Amino acid sequence: MKEFLVISTLGSDQPGIATALSRLVTKSNCNIDDSRMTVLGGEFAVLMLISGNIEHIKGLERDLPALAKKLNLTTITKRTNSRTLDSPERPYTVEVVALDNQGIIHEIASFFSEQGINIENMETETYAAPHTGSPMFSLAMTVNLPADIQILGLREHFLSFCDDRNLDSNIEPLK
């Protein structure tokens, strides 16, 4: 029977972290089903969904602390299950660009939460605008719309929400 383990790792950015983690997963006879890796400031962050049989997962859990110590990583693991959906969902992409100001992420996340819409994935960044150097904010995310939500009404409501906050936005089916 297939078991699942989520690994969250954070450490000073240095070459070889992804290689060492993937080597350990492979050596443990497990598989990386899904992963996200990124540099945030001077830190390298990794999220992995690992699958394998129970003995292989236990072996990985046993060997991971030594690797974390060697690479000076903070690592958290959690057992999980495969994902099941209660009802069919439709994936949509949401993009927002605006002058950066505090609270944008909270307001956008709250908008979707209040509609009963799950955020599947979100990436944000701040950067200096070309020519002016103004602080800009960019958000790209995937949301899963329940089958009973009417996209036309949601889109109009979201665009109005964004217009009220001077946010350039778009919501489209995932391609």
Image: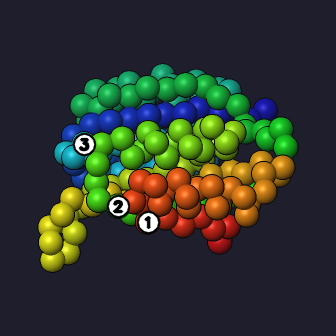
Q: As shown in the figure, which amino acid type bears the numbered disc 3?
A: Glu
Q: As shown in the figure, which amino acid type bears the numbered disc 2?
A: Ala
Q: Report the side of 17 relative to 119 (left or right).
A: left
User: Which is more toward the observer, 169 or 21?
Assistant: 169
- Picture quadrant where residue 103 is located: top left
Judging by the rendered image, the residue that carries numbered circle 1 is 168
Return the x and y of residue 130 as percentages of the image width and height: 20, 75
User: Which is more toward the observer, 64 or 44?
Assistant: 44
Q: As shown in the figure, which amino acid type bears the numbered disc 1?
A: Asp
Q: Are marks 1 and 2 in contact (CB under 8 Å)?
A: yes
Question: How many numbered marks does the figure carry?
Answer: 3
Residue at (78, 57) in percent of width and height: 150
Judging by the rendered image, the residue that carries numbered circle 2 is 98
Q: Please, is residue 104 above or below residue 1 in the view?
A: below
Q: Please, is residue 156 above or below residue 31 in the view?
A: below
Q: Judging from the image, what secondary structure is the residue with disc 3 in?
A: strand
Residue at (64, 61) in percent of width and height: 156
Which is nearer the N-term, disc 1 or disc 2?
2
Q: Please, is residue 157 above or below residue 80 in the view?
A: below
Residue at (44, 34) in percent of width and height: 8
Q: Are marks 3 and 1 in contact (CB under 8 Å)?
A: no
Depth check, mark 3 against mark 1: the one in front is: 1
Classed neighbour count for the residue bearing mark 1: other residues with Cα under 10 Å, few (<14), some (14–19), many (≥20): some
Judging by the rendered image, the residue that carries numbered circle 3 is 43
Classed neighbour count for the residue bearing mark 2: other residues with Cα under 10 Å, few (<14), some (14–19), many (≥20): some
Return the x and y of residue 175 as percentages of the image width and height: 65, 71
